[in-house]
Amino acid sequence: MYKMIVCDLDETLMNDDGSLSDKNAEAIQAATAKGVHFVVNSGRSYTSFQNDLEKMHLRDQPNQYSISYNGGLVLENKDNKPLIVNAMPFDVAKDVFEVGAANHAAATHVYTQDVLYIYNPTPDDSNYLKTRGVSFEVMDTPDFDQFKNLNVMKVIMALPTVDERKAMRDAVQSKVDSSKLAVTFSSGRYVEFNPAGIDKGSASVQLGKLLDIKPEEIIAAGDNSNDLPMLKAVGLPVSVSNGIDTVKDAAKYVTEADNNHDALAEVINKFVL
């Protein structure tokens, strides 16, 4: 019996327009009514998906949980109480940011525990964030020392092409010891940097331990490379049909439906209800 579902948001649970379908929401409610934990496991901040949790009937609920920042933060939904904080070392985050800020084609995001800051926001990226309900503060200067006394959860760069994103990864790793970083790609637009050892999978296992849930009792669903660690960490890894090839290869089940056609409802109806 599966006791927990950890699920990516964008391009997995959510429609392409950023909305949560009624069928997915109803299936999630049915799963939680059976005592199965449904845990949003996103690269985004928890602040951006509160309305979606409301539709799932999980917002501000005790004994319900969310994971943000690719595993950087684990919260209990009641009062958004932090349970596990996996922040980046400041010097590592600063070095990553400075590489991103030097590239004028990149929108460089700095996720603190509660606020997203962006240096050099681009119209395409800002429009994408708006459809996801993501708010941010614009950084007017590349002075990273303003974050000295804050938890920096991750640093990411939005770039338009795969080649540019891979080049950014290589540029960062030429400056920062790669053993200090977990690097992933997401949403067909981002290259993401977390602390080494911190990812969606490690956070899923951490939360499972807190809840006395074994990895083999967890379902994970995703579509992109930042979802691979959680798929590899759990008993039932699932790819939505629109997932990239490496995600499908890692999955034990690939949905017939894509993210725009209630893929998560398919998973819940097949394996939980």
Image (cartoon, helix red, strand yellow):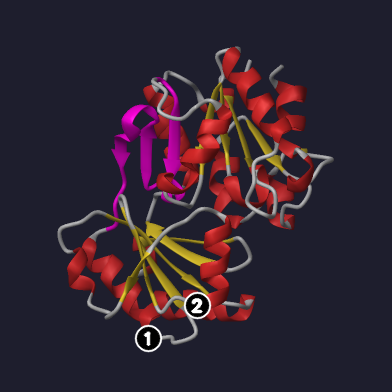
Instruction: Give the mark nearest the N terminus, 1 or 2.
Output: 1
Say which amino acid is labelled 2.
Thr
User: What residue do we see at 46% from left, 30% from top?
Assistant: 59
User: What residue do we see at 67% from left, 54% from top?
Assistant: 17
Q: The C terminus appears in which quarter of the rendering?
A: top right
The numbered mark at residue 102 is 1
The residue sitting at the right extreme is: 256
Which quadrant of the view contains residue 233?
A: top right
The numbered mark at residue 144 is none
Highlighted range, magenta: 63-88
Which quadrant of the view contains residue 267?
A: top right
User: What residue do we see at 44% from left, 24% from top?
Assistant: 64
The numbered mark at residue 122 is 2
Front disc: 1 or 2: 2
Magenta stretch: includes residue 25: no
- In the picture, measured across the screen, residue 187 lies left or right of residue 169, that is right
Is residue 91 visible to the viewer in this orientation of the structure?
Answer: yes
- In the image, is residue 11 above or below residue 53? below
| Distance from the alpha carbon under mark 1 to that under mark 2 | 15 Å
- In the picture, measured across the screen, residue 155 lies left or right of residue 244, that is left
